[in-house]
Image (cartoon, grey):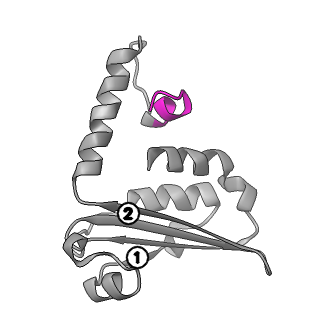
Amino acid sequence: MLKFMGMLERSGHLFHGHRIALTESHQAQKTSVPGTAVGMSHALGLAAGDIRSVRSAEVQSRDLHIPKEHLGRHAYHRIDIGDGLCSLTLETRVYGDAPYADGVARIVAAVRAHPLDNRIYSVMEFVHSGWL
């Protein structure tokens, strides 16, 4: 996911002016702002209010094809870009807690493997440096 976010940060501006739709889905109990989707919308030149958020388990299962066993913990994002006769769809799916734990382990390993200055780093710096 971090590499995908990095790709959008660097290249999302190439799609400004095109028709773009962004859909995100998380478990029904999620009430916080969908931060990943907001970051994607910013990279693509969309307003955060243009994000379609799905919290209905029925819609998630039927329309987004989220497996029933992952309705309680998932992250789904779909970006649809079009300019008439050409269209592009980018989709991410994260199921369960394991991908998050693995991601944190990779970040810790990158910190241990590289000499760092005494400052605050953005995790995206690690992505852009090829450390993740």
**Residue at (54% x, 27% y) in the render:** 129
Mark 2, other Cα within 10 Å: few <14 / some 14–19 / many ≥20: some
Between 91 and 35, the one lying in front of the other is 91
Name the quadrant containing residue 33: bottom left
The reply to whether discs 2 and 1 touch (Cβ–Cβ < 8 Å) is yes
Q: CA distance from mark 2 to mark 1?
A: 8 Å
* Label 1 crowd bin: few (<14), some (14–19), many (20+), radius 10 Å: some
Q: Is residue 65 above or below residue 79?
A: below
- Give the quadrant of residue 72: bottom left
Q: Position of residue 107 (x, y in %)?
A: 34, 31
Q: Is residue 97 magenta?
A: no
Tag shown at residue 34 = 2
Q: Quadrant of the C terminus?
A: top left
Q: At 50% across and 34% down in the image, what residue appears?
A: 127
Q: Residue under circle 1?
A: 53
Looking at the picture, tell me which residue is in the foreground, 82 or 31.
Answer: 82
Image quadrant of residue 111?
top left
- Whether 102 is drawn above or below 34: the answer is above
**Residue 92 x %, y %:** 45, 62
Residue type highlighted by circle 2: Pro
Q: Amino acid at mark 1?
A: Ser
Element on which disc 1 rests: strand
Range covered by the magenta-colored residues: 124-132
Which residue occupies 60% across, 54% down?
A: 43
The verdict on residue 129 being magenta is yes
